[in-house]
Image: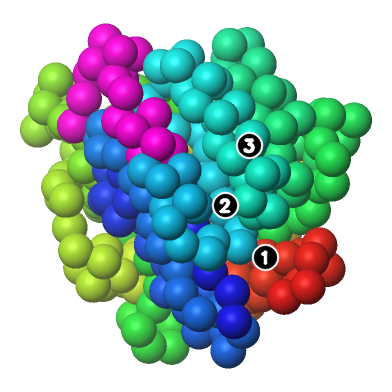
Amino acid sequence: MKKILLICNNYDSTRDGLGKYTKIMKEELQKFSDVEEVFVETGYTDDSNKIKMLFSIEMSKAIHRAIKKIKQININYIIVEYPFQEYNPLIILQYKLLASVCKRYKVILAISIHEYVRAKKLRKLVIDFMVRNSDITFVTDKITKKALNKKAKTIFYRDMIGTVFPNKEISPSEKDGSFIYFGLVNRSKAFNEMLKAWDEFNKENKYHLKIITSSDISDYNLEKLNNIKVFYNLSEEKVAEHFSSSTYAIVPIIPEITTANGTFKVAALFGCICIGHFSKTLSNLDFIIDIDNYDLVAFKNGLIKAVNLSSENKIALIKSATSFGNKYSKSNTAKQVIEVFRKKAVF
């Protein structure tokens, strides 16, 4: 029986997808018969501004607590889910110490990378350092694997999953023709471009857009736009209800939607026809509306193309989306991680 310790920022927070992902993984990993217990160390910065996150030492303290735990109990594996929302460079020193302690106590240290290609230069340098000082590196896509292959001791794929799951079978008959946007509003989303395109597209108020977020978007003056309703900090059950009834999901990820994007996986799992700019690896999927870029004309045309699909085609695409989403189950991702651990050491 083995013990696993997870380290992440903002564990189980609705404002941080990685924190929610880690909660799901903890629950799934505990289901394996050869796992005795799964521990978590975390620090909360999900309500902090950029300056606070630069000087925050919450994750340094979380790693310090993890080191104490290694010395006190027989931890066998550690997984660090990265990047953190916090970006204090002090974390480099703490991670080096963590790697050293893991080596001394024969603990396998794994770094689980969720974002690399679109990360800023300084963030990439931190990731490079962590990868070099880890026994295992987990990645989601081929591009990240290629970028880190020569830096990692060993590197493996594990699928990214969504953080919200249906509690019943998705039915095309329950779809009401509405659009949904789900997630934080930040620099990695073409959110303002989406609003401008929506206003042009929906001049006649035929369609409805639901925005579900935990970000403060009061400055966008959404009450002036056509048929947009905003929902803040909803429970997973309420999010699932809105996704179940939505026909389309707008996923305006910058620069493009990849297999690493959890929101896209959520939308697919709920049978939504997805609109956005997709990577080449996803561009052949039939249930997506792939727009060239996020300028006004391209975005508006993508929305028009979506609503002009025939009823028969919509039903087929909803089923196709659900089938694709079901491939990325939380149990399968946990199994991928456990199987790597079993290969790396006696488990």
Residue 12 sits above or below residue 276 on the image: below
Residue sitting at x 57%, y 53%:
78
Residue mark closest to the camera, 2 vs 1:
2
Residue mark closest to the camera, 3 vs 2:
3
Q: Which residues are magenta?
A: 47-64
Looking at the rendered structure, the kind of residue marked 2 is: Ile
Q: Which residue, as the protein is rendered here, is positioned at the far right?
A: 150
Looking at the rendered structure, the kind of residue marked 1 is: Val
Residue 79: mark in rendering: 2
For label 1, the SS is helix
In space, the residues marked 3 and 2 are separated at their CA atoms by 12 Å
Residue 229 sits above or below residue 345 on the image: above
When asked about the image quadrant of residue 39, the answer is bottom left
In space, the residues marked 2 and 1 are separated at their CA atoms by 10 Å
Q: Is residue 229 magenta?
A: no
Direction from residue 59 to residue 317 in the image, left or right: right
Q: Residues within 10 Å of mark 2 (few under 14, many from 20)?
A: many
When asked about the image quadrant of residue 225, the answer is top left
Direction from residue 209 to residue 299 in the image, left or right: right
Cβ–Cβ under 8 Å for marks 2 and 1: yes
- In primary-sequence order, the first of circles 1 and 3 is 3
Q: Which residue is mark 3?
A: 99
